[in-house]
Image (spheres, grey):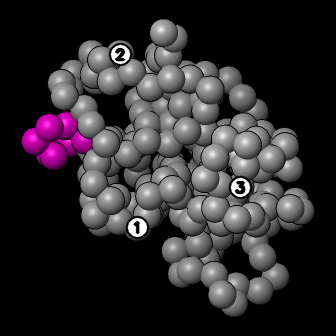
Amino acid sequence: MELYDGRPDSVEGRLPREVRTYDYLDRLDISYQRTDHEPADNMEACYEIDKVLGVVICKNLFLCNRQKTNFYLLMMPGEKKFKTKELSSQINSARLSFADAEDMLRFLDIEPGAVSIMGLMNDRNREVQLLIDEDVLKDEYVGCHPCVCTSSLKLRTKDVMEKFLPATGHVAKVVHLVGED
């Protein structure tokens, strides 16, 4: 794996959702670094990607309430454990669960394994509430996928919060997750 500045020189063979991500970031004048890789299907592969990027890629979870009327994208540090009860009380939503792949595709134009804050650019009706664990905001950089699981990005947290999110019309709700047993 190599680290590159910005978009690939050629977009041949890349999915349209990935190319749209680069176009969106470039339009917003957000600089980023990128690495291409095989899909990361275990923690060892994730650690290798993290080393190349020099940042820990966030754990991104796509959640919904039991009635499937409220959808949430949760960004949290990869090493924290997710506890439904801990989050439910902070957002006043009982019975949180993982949302279906169909809903992920419908709202974020992302498939399982590639969940990312970048998908919010596709949620034009703002039907997904962004939840960010406070510890994510403490880091200068954030790591995420460009809507595909075969590339990863390193962006300034400040650019994500002050440029990307306002452009998508989403407002983040900051949550506090302990994530301990």
Q: Going from the N terminus, do you reach mark 2 or mark 1 first?
A: 2
Does dot 2 land on a helix, a strand or a loop?
helix
N-terminal of the pair, mark 3 or mark 2, is 2
Give me the C-alpha separation between circle 2 and circle 1: 28 Å
Residue at image position (73%, 49%) is 45
Q: Is residue 25 left or right of residue 82?
A: right
Q: Which residues are magenta?
A: 64-70
Dominant SS in magenta: loop
Q: Is residue 97 above or below residue 23?
A: above
Circle number at residue 86: 2
Name the secondary structure under disc 3: strand
User: Amino acid under label 1?
Assistant: Asp
Screen quadrant of the N terminus: bottom right
Question: Left of 72 or right of it: where is 138?
Answer: right
**What label does residue 153 carry, if any?**
3
Residue 29 in view: no
Badges 3 and 2: C-beta atoms under 8 Å apart? no
Residue 148 in sight in this render: yes
Q: Position of residue 77 (x, y in %)?
A: 60, 29
> Residue farthest to the bottom?
12
At x 50%, y 23%, the residue is 81
Q: Which mark is residue 10?
A: none
10 Å crowding of disc 3: few (<14), some (14-19), many (20+): many
Which label lies toward us, 3 or 2? 2
In this view, which residue lies farthest toward the left? Answer: 67
Q: Secondary structure at mark 1?
A: loop
Residue at position x 64%, y 46% in the image: 42
Give neighbour class at mark 2: few <14, some 14-19, many 20+ (Cα, 10 Å).
some
Q: Is residue 140 above or below residue 180?
A: below
Rounded to the nearest angstrom, the CA distance separating label 1 from label 3 is 17 Å
Query: To which residue does mark 1 refer?
Result: 109
